[in-house]
């Protein structure tokens, strides 16, 4: 099959997410909300302000806040049970990728009673009925989970295997950059780099098509322009708004066109050293671009070069040094040893990289030996 573009999520570019949430629910008779969030968001009082607004509008909301980072199925089930008991009609996800992925899984489970998540992960059963609608309200600008049809939940052993299905798409995503104003600089930088790497890898990947190109280039342009500002001047609402929107736009590109070698290597590396996903793809961007550069054609390079704001005479070989400078400018590490990578682990990491789904989508096909070489070079 050729490449496909399908995106059913209603996007609301918002300046007041709570108000827009109430507005959306006012079109529905007797809505009941399960509001999923995490402890961090709960402690800021943000979840409370949403509940108050819903309350004032006469919409009952049951809050579930016990969602850890990188959730496994045993973290999802209590959220599912809470929403089921409350008779929820809508799942609202207020948080980052982990919260949104959990909400998407809960929506699937509520719409398909009796479905076993692990059976679904391993292809032993299928999603047959519509999911309960999920309204995603991202509080970080990074994963793009609000605009993808995949949810990555670990099985009971913690092994991560994504479930991909059109029913996994959020029904609505409300994008309000003001919700990210208090993110610390380091987290802003690393989640923002995830946006940039999604978009670069989607643009360069083998499954790119004219629609995904528009989204990928748009998100690259925005991240290049606004990520340094959002990182170093976190109170700049314009920068926050642009990065929140870029995360969603880049998420669309990645969801439809796939990812590449930085994400393929990031899986085993982040797992082995328990690293933040965005930080891992950031440090892996320069080495994987150095490897991919010889396969970037002049036709593909030209629009990318413009989006990156590189001079007209620059070439694909200049891309990796540019990325090193960009990452360093955000205060993030640019050598793999700085995030704890050990030389002795490289052969195993390279071998595990070849088993990642996105490994085959990279602009230049790598082998395990290529991965060993590039990891050693950037150690
Ligand atoms: Fe990512």
Image: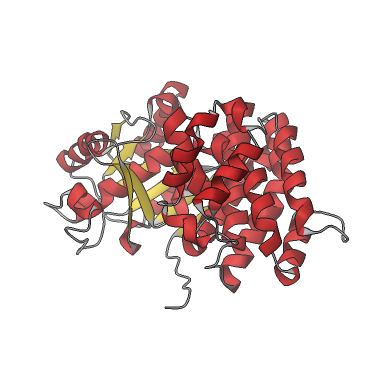
Question: In the figure, residue 268 lies in which quadrant?
Answer: top left
* Residue nearest the observer in this picture, 362 or 98: 362
* Residue 65 seen in this snapshot: yes
Question: In the figure, residue 123 lies in which quadrant?
Answer: bottom left
In the rendered image, the quadrant that contains the N terminus is bottom left
* Residue nearest the observer in this picture, 47 or 248: 248
Where in the figure is residue 9, as x and y percent of width and height? Answer: 43, 60
Direction from residue 198 to residue 80 in the image, left or right? left
* Residue 170 seen in this snapshot: no
The residue lying furthest to the top in this view is: 43
* Residue nearest the observer in this picture, 141 or 82: 141
In the rendered image, the quadrant that contains the C terminus is top right
* Residue nearest the observer in this picture, 304 or 289: 289
Where in the figure is residue 317, as x and y percent of width and height? Answer: 77, 54
Where in the figure is residue 58, as x and y percent of width and height? Answer: 31, 41
Direction from residue 260 to residue 348 in the image, left or right? left
Direction from residue 205 to residue 256 in the image, left or right? left
Q: How many marks?
A: 0
The residue lying furthest to the bottom in this view is: 1
Direction from residue 76 to residue 44 in the image, left or right? right
Question: In the figure, residue 364 lies in which quadrant?
Answer: bottom right
Q: What colour scheme was applied to this rendering of the protein?
A: secondary structure
Residue at 62%, 49% in the rendered image: 288
Q: Is residue 2 above or below residue 306?
A: below
Residue at 60%, 32% in the rendered image: 336
Q: Is residue 250 above or below residue 18?
A: below
Q: Is residue 126 above or below residue 339?
A: below
Where in the figure is residue 136, as x and y percent of width and height? Answer: 42, 47
Residue at 44%, 39% in the rendered image: 348
Residue at 31%, 61% in the rendered image: 167
């Amino acid at each position: 099959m050729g490449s496909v573009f399908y995106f059913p999520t209603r996007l609301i570019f918002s300046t007041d997410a709570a108000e827009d949430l109430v507005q959306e629910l006012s079109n529905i008779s007797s809505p009941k909300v399960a509001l999923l969030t995490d402890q961090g968001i709960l402690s800021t009082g943000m979840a409370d302000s949403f509940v108050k607004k819903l309350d004032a509008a006469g919409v009952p909301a049951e809050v579930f806040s016990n969602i850890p980072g990188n959730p496994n199925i045993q973290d999802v089930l209590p959220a599912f049970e809470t929403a089921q008991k409350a008779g929820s009609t809508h799942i609202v996800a207020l948080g980052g990728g982990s919260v949104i992925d959990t909400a998407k899984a809960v929506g699937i489970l509520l719409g398909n009673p009796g479905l076993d998540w692990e059976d679904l992960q391993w292809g032993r059963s299928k999603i047959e009925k519509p999911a309960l609608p999920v309204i995603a309200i991202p509080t970080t600008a990074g994963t793009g989970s609000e605009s993808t049809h995949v949810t990555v939940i670990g099985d009971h052993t913690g092994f991560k295997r994504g479930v991909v299905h059109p029913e996994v798409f959020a029904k609505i995503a409300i994008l309000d950059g003001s919700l990210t104003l208090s993110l610390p600089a380091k987290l802003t930088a690393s989640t923002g780099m995830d946006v940039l790497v999604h978009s670069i890898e989607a643009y360069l990947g083998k499954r790119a098509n004219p629609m995904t190109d528009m989204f990928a280039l748009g998100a690259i342009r925005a991240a290049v322009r606004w990520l340094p500002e959002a990182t170093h001047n976190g109170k700049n609402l314009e920068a926050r708004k642009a990065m929140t929107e870029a995360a969603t736009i880049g998420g669309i590109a990645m969801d439809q066109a796939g990812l590449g070698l930085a994400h393929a290597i990031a899986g085993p590396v982040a797992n082995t050293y328990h690293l933040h996903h965005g930080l891992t793809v950031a440090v892996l961007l320069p080495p994987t671009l150095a490897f991919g550069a010889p396969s970037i054609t002049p036709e593909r390079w030209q629009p990318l070069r413009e989006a990156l704001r590189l001079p007209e005479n620059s070439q694909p070989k200049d891309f990796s040094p540019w990325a090193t400078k960009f990452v360093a400018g955000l205060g993030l590490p640019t050598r793999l040893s700085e995030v704890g990578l050990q030389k002795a682990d490289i052969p195993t990491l390279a071998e595990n990289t070849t088993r990642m789904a996105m490994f085959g989508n990279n602009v230049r096909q790598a082998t395990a030996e290529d991965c060993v070489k590039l990891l050693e070079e950037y150690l």
